[in-house]
Image: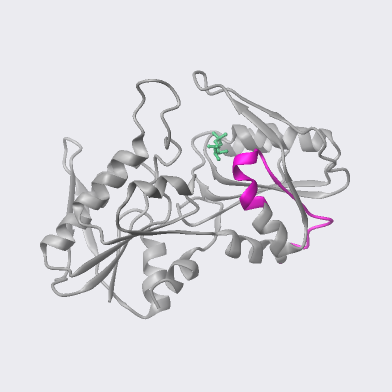
Amino acid sequence: MIVVPGPSAPKVGERVAQIIGAKKVGVDYKNFPDGESYIRLTEGVKGEEVVLVHTTYPQPDKRVLELLLLIDTLKDLGAIKVKVVVPYMAYSRQDTRFRDGEAVSINTIFRLIEAAGADEFYTVDIHKEFSLGAFKIKTKNLYATEVIADHLKGMGLHEPYILSPDKGALDIARRIGEMLGAEYGNLEKARDRITGAITVKGDGVDARGRDVVITDDLISTGGTIANACKILKDGGARRVIAVCSHPLLVAGAYERMKGAGLDEVLGTDTVDSEVSKISVAPLIAKEFR
Ligand code: R5P
């Protein structure tokens, strides 16, 4: 088995190769002046079973295209199996036709990944697991909660309360809460489908004097976390920490959350960011030992 760390966030792929003790094959990549992507495998892969680790952020459109080029090229060059690992799967929030006429983007992308020649597909904390149903090949969603909970255990939290910003992500808070032996629950979030504006309510949540950990699958603009944090700080929380699997942190997100009183933000390395302090590489490596 060989590991190919894709050009986006290659560190995770490299760590996976190291942990499982597999040979690593590199990828040369560049952009042509007109913006087109170029990729080239630096060694042969004929007859090999390949684990391709390639994430899809930043520049999700470009990363998705690179992923398709890589899968197809690996197969074309004779790899016998391509096991695709996408630690952060972009477009997974558009898993439903919320408004008439919309693209169900994640279905389109999954069909393309399969058509390109993927034999198996793995991802971490996909927005909603049901979207993996668009594939016919073997798929698996890995839960980062295990590595996140381990990290939180070392933080000396005071009367921790693990909260999801909405019901949709309650499962993440529940899993972490159970691993820490801490109380867990959820706030109520609503998002305007046209303007994107977010409102968060904290009815029935008593965070007074406690360290609250807000858990979510991803942080993009930081609006969800900032709204939640404000409610919790107004309600007397001692410390508010946000932790997510995918710290996209678009421009201004960090400042928005800090401005709302957030004490700390943590994420995993499914995407590279200044807060990607928790590695999912051991989690991924377990699948291929
Ligand atoms: C949405 O349902 C997701 O789980 C996140 O809560 C959301 O995408 C975060 O986005 P933002 O950081 O822009 O509020």
Left or right position of 276 against 233 = left
User: Residue pushed farthest right?
Assistant: 209
Q: Which residues are magenta?
A: 154-173
Say if the magenta span includes residue 172: yes
Residue at image point 45% right, 46% down: 130
Q: How is the image coloured?
A: one colour
Residue at image point 50% right, 34% down: 251
Res 15 → quadrant: bottom left
255 or 267, which is in the foreground? 267
List x then y, in percent, for residue 7.
30, 55
Q: Is residue 152 above or below residue 59?
A: below
Left or right position of 221 against 105 = right
The quarter of the picture where the C terminus appears is bottom left
List x then y, in percent, for residue 123.
42, 56
The reply to whether residue 63 is in sight is no
List x then y, in percent, for residue 198.
61, 26
39 or 216, which is in the foreground? 216
Say if the magenta span includes residue 25: no
Res 53 → quadrant: bottom left
Residue at image point 49% right, 50% down: 273
255 or 44, which is in the foreground? 44
